[in-house]
Amino acid sequence: MTLLLSLIRQTTITTAPLHFVVSKCGYAAPASAVFSAKAKKAKKAAGSTKIVLPVETDTKKLVEYVCGSNILKEGEDVKLKDDSEYPDWLWNIYLGEPKKLEELDPNTKAYWRKLREKNLRRNNRLIAGKKF
């Protein structure tokens, strides 16, 4: 049944015995359509210009506001508050490079997440190297 469907969907050259039949699929677009699409993209890219965004240079505004935080057309950027108005945990956030597995405490959730991630990556590498 599948052989019959494949013969209907494809045009075949039947000058050779059936097991040497060369199939040609008729689904591909003509070459002229592909080249014209590429030409259209090239024209579109050549016609577009780079948008230059304004950069804030006012030092007072840079110190008092979070510049670029307003995503609306109207309104203003978020005003910065005093350090005492922010929670304490904000100043204790670790901003360095991610800690290695050996540096973490085994009794923490971060340790086990890191261990699981490391094992997943190892298993994926091993699976990728196997042959069928």
Image: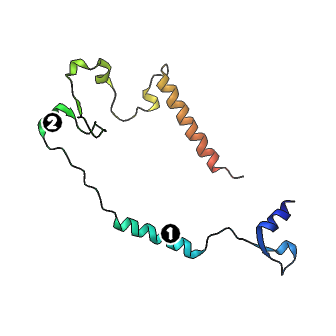
Q: Position of residue 14 (x, y in %)?
A: 83, 78
Between 23 and 52, the one lying in front of the other is 52
Between 123 and 49, the one lying in front of the other is 49
Q: CA distance from mark 2 to mark 1?
A: 47 Å
Q: Nearer the viewer, mark 2 or mark 1?
A: 1
Q: Residue at x 17, y 31 (%)?
A: 64
Determine whether 10 is above or below 15 in the image. Answer: above
Q: Residues within 10 Å of mark 1 (few under 14, many from 20)?
A: few
SS type, badge 2: helix
Give the numbered dot on residue 37. Answer: 1
- Amino acid tagged 1: Ala
SS type, badge 1: helix
- Horizontal relation, residue 97 to residue 113: left or right: left
Between 103 and 77, the one lying in front of the other is 77
| Extreme residue toward the bottom, this view | 15
Q: Residue at x 85, y 72 (%)?
A: 19
Q: Position of residue 44 (x, y in %)?
A: 40, 66
Q: Quadrant of residue 7?
A: bottom right
Determine whether 95 is above or below 127 in the image. Answer: above
**Colour pattern of the rendering:** rainbow
Give the numbered dot on residue 78. Answer: none
Give the numbered dot on residue 61. Answer: 2
Q: Quadrant of residue 85?
A: top left
